Structure formats: structure tokens, C-alpha cells
Amino acid sequence: MRRVIGVDVHRTFGEVVFWENGRLRHGGRIDMTRTALEGFGKTLLASDEVVLEATANSMAVSRVLAPFAARVIIANPLQVKAIAQAHVKTDKIDAGTLASLQAAGYLPQIWTPDAETERKRRLVARRYQVVRHRTRLKNEVHSILHAHLIRKCPHADLFNARGRA
């Protein structure tokens, strides 16, 4: 018996719908906390497929549920046209559509990086933020000096060792 579980993930809760033997069954809501997700994960079968739509917290949800299910799939929301074009849009319908599309083999999914790749991505993103912040601060210092009619530093860079001296 194949089961596909669709979860419409929000910031504080997820709406769960089970697809079993061509029928949809509402599974209720789960809180988006590690404890609640682990509790939900313990109710899953080892052969279950769990489907989530890509959101800000879907990778975290995926990591928590992965040990409990055969697969955790993150759907590409830009390509899930059935959800985007639905006339009646509720969390239950969205979760059911995710499960039904996966069961039918039509679910467009995103590539999910392994833990090491995800760690490197976060590191690069954080470095990018720090460099942008540093640039903003340097520009602010230049602006303050300019506003107070302080001449430009005679050295190429105000912020290297010679410029700071």
C-alpha cells in the first residue's frame, strides 16, 4: 500500500493530507516545532513519501522528517500550477494537491542539497552579507568626511594600514 503525505507548510503550522489508494484523507494540523514534527514523524511508515512546497522553513522540516519516511520531497512552487491556479484555495486542498500530484508522478520537485553543501551555501551567503555591510559602513564614513569638508585621504584606501594611520 503506497501512502503519500502532502503537507502545506506555514510559519507556525502545517496542514496534513494523506493520499492512500487514490483517496485523500485529512490528517489535521501539526505545529512547526521540532518536537511536534518528530512526533508526527513517528506516526509515519518507513515507506511513506512526504511532500512539502518550498518555503522558508521547508528545508528544516525536511531534515526533521527525513529519518522517518522513505522520501521527503520539496515541490517547486513556481511549477505547481495546479495550486497556483486553483479557484478554491485552502490549506487542505493545497496539501491534497501536492499529495495527488506526487502520487500521479507529476510533481515538479527542487533539488535538495546534502548537509555539507547546505552548510557551505549558508557560509557563502553570510560572507556576502558581511561584505555588503562592511561596504555600507565604509561608504558612510566617506560620506561623513565629505559632509564635514574633510579632504580625501591622500592614500589610495582610507581603510588600509597607511590610510588608517
Image (cartoon, grey):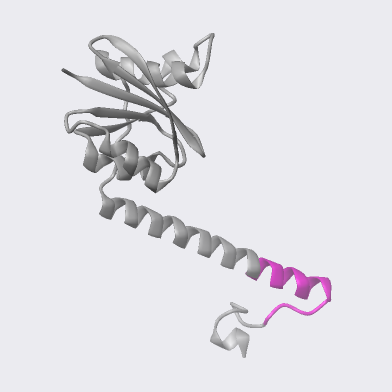
Dominant secondary structure, magenta = helix
Above or below, 58 relative to 138: above
Judged left or right of residue 84, residue 146 is right
Indicate yes or no whether the magenta region holds residue 144: yes
Above or below, 64 relative to 135: above
Specify the farthest residue to the right.
148
Above or below, 17 relative to 137: above
Judged left or right of residue 88, residue 114 is left
Query: Which region shows up in magenta?
Result: 138-153
Q: Position of residue 117 (x, y in %)?
A: 28, 52
Q: Residue at x 64, y 70 (%)?
A: 138
Above or below, 22 relative to 164: above
Q: Position of residue 53 (x, y in %)?
A: 40, 29
Q: Position of residue 155 (x, y in %)?
A: 62, 82
Where is residue 69, by image quadrant?
Answer: top left
Judged left or right of residue 164, residue 41 is left
Q: Residue at x 24, y 28 (%)?
A: 49
Q: Is residue 14 at all visible to an observer of this figure?
A: yes
126 or 163, which is in the foreground? 126
Judged left or right of residue 109, residue 15 is right
Q: Residue at x 47, y 41 (%)?
A: 56
Q: Is residue 106 at all visible to an observer of this figure?
A: no
Which corner quadrant holds the C terminus? Answer: bottom right
Q: Position of residue 164 (x, y in %)?
A: 61, 86
Indicate yes or no whether the magenta region holds residue 40: no
Where is residue 81, by image quadrant?
Answer: top left
Which corner quadrant holds the N terminus? Answer: top left
The number of discs equals 0
